[in-house]
Image (tube, rainbow, N blue to C red):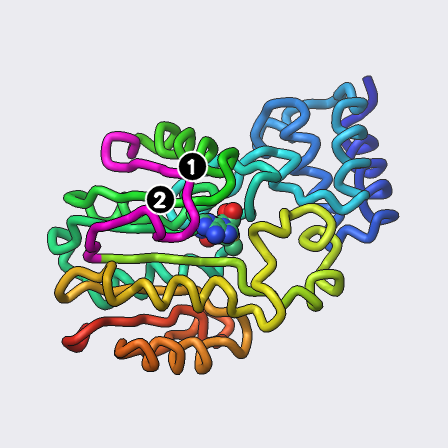
């Protein structure tokens, strides 16, 4: 056992040596997680056994994402389990839920939701939490991601309104949906090695790699939207930096109206698409 302050100092040193951006804050989070207490309770402890936290800090110093170490990440109103099978949900992706709520503010109008490339289930589960009459399907090609999303549906109390299937985008679906959400892999293959170490070395290529121009998944998904959208339905796709305009053009080429909305940093992030009639 050593004094808590000394443990935090040593944890901070391990993290800083690995180039972790905010070592002081993460030292507290890692120590609290290792001890199974919350941050408030941490301050009540005069002495701690630091060894389990040191082991976790060494993983973090090797730039493993904190969320993979703690096993959880907040998204929208939900606390989700995460795993290296898929992407850690990002705050930027919440822009898609904001856009859905802006364009479909009446919570009773959305009955069917499709989430393509569901990963942790983040988008589908956040949408189901907001649209209480909706049932949703999440599709992912990676079986371990489907299992994780299913576990998250149970964890968030939404399992009765969610189903998850393994599949290649919407190939196996013959139904129409009021709301379609997708945050597909969109990083151009050649850009992946240059991403921050947490992403490039630890998050799976299956969740990141969008092919040579980043548009492989967009082309597949957008081509299917006309047959997947219910009358009056909306599709909202996440775009990477600089991708919103070409993605809207791709949608237009498939007969869809499309417009982009920015994330909190002002980057056009959510591309909203609708068939036939206008969405607002
Ligand atoms: C960028 S991640 C998004 C995960 C989650 N929707 C989110 O926003 O956090 C993309 C997801 O698409 C899945 N995926 C990749 N190719 C796919 C395909 N051909 N069919 C279905 N899912 C696919 C990946 O396994 C991954 O979980």
Seen at 49% across and 56% down, the residue is 91
Vertically, is 267 above or below 182? below
Seen at 62% across and 69% down, the residue is 212
User: In which quadrant of the rendered image does the N terminus lie?
Assistant: top right
Crowding near the residue tagged with mark 2, few <14, some 14–19, many ≥20 C-alpha atoms within 10 Å: many
Seen at 60% across and 59% down, the residue is 209
Q: Secondary structure at mark 2?
A: strand
Mark positioned earlier in the residue sequence (1 or 2)? 2
Mark 1, mark 2: which one is toward the viewer?
A: 2
Q: Which residue is mark 1?
A: 149
Residue 34 belongs to the span the image colors magenta: no
Q: Quadrant of residue 34?
A: top right
Question: What's the magenta region?
Answer: 158-178
Question: Which numbered circle lies on residue 172?
Answer: none
Q: Secondary structure at mark 1?
A: helix
Crowding near the residue tagged with mark 1, few <14, some 14–19, many ≥20 C-alpha atoms within 10 Å: many
Seen at 28% across and 62% down, the residue is 100
The CA distance from mark 1 to mark 2 is 8 Å
Tally of numbered discs: 2
- Tell me if I can see residue 166 in this picture: yes
Q: Which residue is mark 2?
A: 138
Q: Is residue 94 left or right of residue 51?
A: left
Report x, y in % for residue 112. Answer: 20, 49
Report x, y in % for residue 63. Answer: 76, 46
Report x, y in % for residue 119. Answer: 47, 44
């Amino acid at each position: 056992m050593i004094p808590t302050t000394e443990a935090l100092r040593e944890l901070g040193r391990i993290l800083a040596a690995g180039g972790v951006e905010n070592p002081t804050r993460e030292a507290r989070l890692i120590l609290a997680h290792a001890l199974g207490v919350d941050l408030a309770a941490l301050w009540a402890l005069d002495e701690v056994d630091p060894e389990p936290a040191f082991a976790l800090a060494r993983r973090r110093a090797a730039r493993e994402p904190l969320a993979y170490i703690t096993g959880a990440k907040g998204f929208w109103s939900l606390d989700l389990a995460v795993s290296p099978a898929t992407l850690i949900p990002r705050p930027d992706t919440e822009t898609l839920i904001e856009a859905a709520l802006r364009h479909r503010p009446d919570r009773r109008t959305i009955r069917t939701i499709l989430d393509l490339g569901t990963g942790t289930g983040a988008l589908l589960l956040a949408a189901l939490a907001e649209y209480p009459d909706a049932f949703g399907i999440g599709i992912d090609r990676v079986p371990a991601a489907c299992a994780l999303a299913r576990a998250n549906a149970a964890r968030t109390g939404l399992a009765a309104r969610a189903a998850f299937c393994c599949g290649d985008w919407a190939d196996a679906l013959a139904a129409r949906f009021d709301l379609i959400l997708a945050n597909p892999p969109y990083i151009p293959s050649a850009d992946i090695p240059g991403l921050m170490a947490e992403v490039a070395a630890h998050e799976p290529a299956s969740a990141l790699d969008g092919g040579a121009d980043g548009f492989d998944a967009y082309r597949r998904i957008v081509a299917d939207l006309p047959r997947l959208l219910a009358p009056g339905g909306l599709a909202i796709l996440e775009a990477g930096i600089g991708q919103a305009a070409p993605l809207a053009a791709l949608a237009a080429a498939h007969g869809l109206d499309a417009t982009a909305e920015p994330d909190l940093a002002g980057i056009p992030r959510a591309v909203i698409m609708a068939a036939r009639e206008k969405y607002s």
